Image (tube, rainbow, N blue to C red):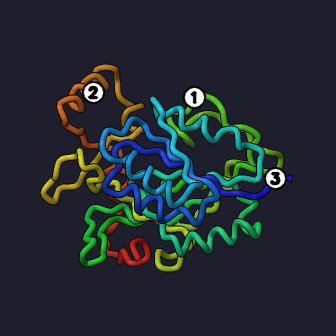
Amino acid sequence: MNRLQIIGIVLIQNEDLFIDRVLSNIVDFCDEIIVADNRSTDQTAEKVRILRQQYPWIKYRSIAKPALSHDLISGYAGTDTWIFGVDGDEWYDPEGLKKLRAGIMAGEYQSHWMILGNVLNCVDLNLEKGYARGYLAPPCRSMTKLYNFAAIEAWNGPCPERLHGGKIRFQQGYAPSQRLELYKDIAWEDTPFRCCHLCFIRRSSREKEQNGQEVVRKNISDMNSERIYSRLKSRCLRLLGVEEKSPWKREKYMRGTLVKKSLQPFIS
């Protein structure tokens, strides 16, 4: 019989400003963390190396393209494993995760194949004063990625990155509709599963200062929707050090009212 476990899969590229916080906030939640580094050129790899000395269950993998990150976790399908997908712009509440882990280990969430948590999509981060301003989910979409791989037989097919795309074949008794949408049922202050999503914040020393303007990196969804000309244009701009902004992120993550929340649970 398999031992119930939680595996983190962290897909990153140039995250040296925040990667230590991203990882340290989830180390007690995960039994193992796989860091899939897609050719970072800043100090990300060195920061991960330092953290691995303290937390040996962090594993580092250098990958040539994001699609390879899915291969690192697809083999867990059909086992007693929860897969926790994390990006380099996500700070989770570690105390909340302790409560969530206890519930997972007790089988409280076993009837669900996916859990969607609360999110604050941050446009402003003030570490000195300990607050962030941003847009909550809901009404924004939740982008958390926590999956019960015991509920699926396989997750194969073309995946642009881990836990995106492809084709999922469910175990008997499970269906795509069996998602637990915590963010719709529990308030930000009360949820065990909440994320400060730094999607509009500069997160690499290689990115230029924006003088108060949000940083909006293009993501996989943006790049997959581009035509060949647009992809060539984006590649040329990146070579020139210019990062195009993502219209997709603005559409999905800037909905509702701009709110201010304490960072204390995430940085204490």
Q: Furthest-right residue in view?
A: 1
Label 3 environment density (alpha carbons within 10 Å; few <14, some 14–19, many ≥20): few
- Residue matched to label 3: 2
Residue 148's spot in the image, x, y percent? 69, 53
Residue drawn at x 43%, y 63% is 91
> Is disc 1 in contact with disc 2, using a CB cutoff of under 8 Å?
no
Q: Furthest-front residue in view?
A: 53
Q: Which mark sits nearer the N-terminus, 1 or 3?
A: 3
Q: Which mark sits nearer the N-terminus, 1 or 2?
A: 1
Residue 183's spot in the image, x, y percent? 53, 67
Residue 84 visible in the snapshot: no
Q: Which mark sits nearer the N-terminus, 3 or 2?
A: 3
- The span from disc 1 to disc 2 (Cα, nearest Å) is 22 Å
Label 1 environment density (alpha carbons within 10 Å; few <14, some 14–19, many ≥20): few
Q: Nearer the viewer, mark 3 or mark 2?
A: 3
User: Secondary structure under badge 1?
Assistant: loop
Amino acid tagged 2: Arg
Number of callouts: 3
Q: Which mark is residue 235?
A: 2
Q: Nearer the viewer, mark 1 or mark 3?
A: 3
Depth check, front residue: 151 or 15: 15
Q: Quick check: 180 left or right of 132?
A: right
Residue 220's quadrant in the figure? top left
- Residue matched to label 1: 158
Residue drawn at x 17%, y 30% is 240
Residue drawn at x 36%, y 39% is 40
User: Secondary structure under badge 2?
Assistant: helix
Residue 178 visible in the snapshot: yes
